[in-house]
């Protein structure tokens, strides 16, 4: 069996003024709005976590953190990612990220100035190099101004799957 797995994940949350905008494990400074959610609303980490689970056929984050459960209110999305990583470790053994590519759709603010910090933050969370983390930012051309959306693809190497 080939020891590689590809995963894809997607997430979107409604925007609300006056709340922090969390994306890719960091807060975007001076944003006019942030995303509302039962967690900190980091759509990029949610899409990434789903992509990792999908790579190994392990479902999605809603199974581990049901939105209906009040215990998960204000949950840090890094905890979701760490839980997913631990679950994959239990089920699959050793894994490494070959590379990851994400797209964030958001009309404002401009995210380009934060790309390098976000690559570094995600690389640290994924124990890979910033150059293995691709990030593109898109506007919706004014067609979807009320939400922020992320899509993520990940390629994983899982050497124990080869045997
Ligand atoms: O969506 P559009 O193609 O018009 O975006 C043009 C460019 O603006 C993108 O390629 C990206 O570099 C940048 N951008 C950004 N932050 C956003 C949306 C777009 O930096 N929130
Ligand atoms: Mg979410």
Image: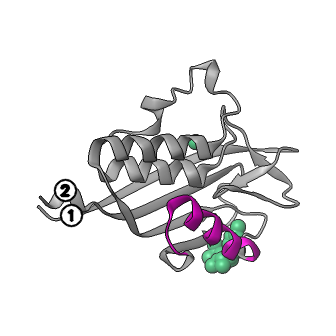
Left or right for 156, reference 159: right
Mark 1 lies on a secondary structure that is: loop
Which image quadrant for residue 112?
bottom right
Which residue is at the front of the view, 7 or 146?
Answer: 7
Locate the N terminus by quadrant: bottom left
Is residue 68 shown to the viewer in this render? yes
Which residue is at the front of the view, 110 or 97?
Answer: 97
Mark 2 lies on a secondary structure that is: helix
Left or right for 31, reference 2: right
- Up the image or down, 18 lies above or below 101; here it is above
The residue sitting at 73% across, 71% down in the picture is 114
Q: Position of residue 80 (x, y in %)?
A: 55, 41
Q: Is residue 117 magenta?
A: yes
Magenta residues, as a range?
113-129
Cβ–Cβ under 8 Å for marks 2 and 1: yes
Kindly identify which residue carries mark 1.
3
Image disc number at residue 161: 2
Badge 1: how crowded within 10 Å, few (<14), some, or many (20+)?
Answer: few
Q: Is mark 1 within 8 Å of ligand 2?
A: no
């Amino acid at each position: 069996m080939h020891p590689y797995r590809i995963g894809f994940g997607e997430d979107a949350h409604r925007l609300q003024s006056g709340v922090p905008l969390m994306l890719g494990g960091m807060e975007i400074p001076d944003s006019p709005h942030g995303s509302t959610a039962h967690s900190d609303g980091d759509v990029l980490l949610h899409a990434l976590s789903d992509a990792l689970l999908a790579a190994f056929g392990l479902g999605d984050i809603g199974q581990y953190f049901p939105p209906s459960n009040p215990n998960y209110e204000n949950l840090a999305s890094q905890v979701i990612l760490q839980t997913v990583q631990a679950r994959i470790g239990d089920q699959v053994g050793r894994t490494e990220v070959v590379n990851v590519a994400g797209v964030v759709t958001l009309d404002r603010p401009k995210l380009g100035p934060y790309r390098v910090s976000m690559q570094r933050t995600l690389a640290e969370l994924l124990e890979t190099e910033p150059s293995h983390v691709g990030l593109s930012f898109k506007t919706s051309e004014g067609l979807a101004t009320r939400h922020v959306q992320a899509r993520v693809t990940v390629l994983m190497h899982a050497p124990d799957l080869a045997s």
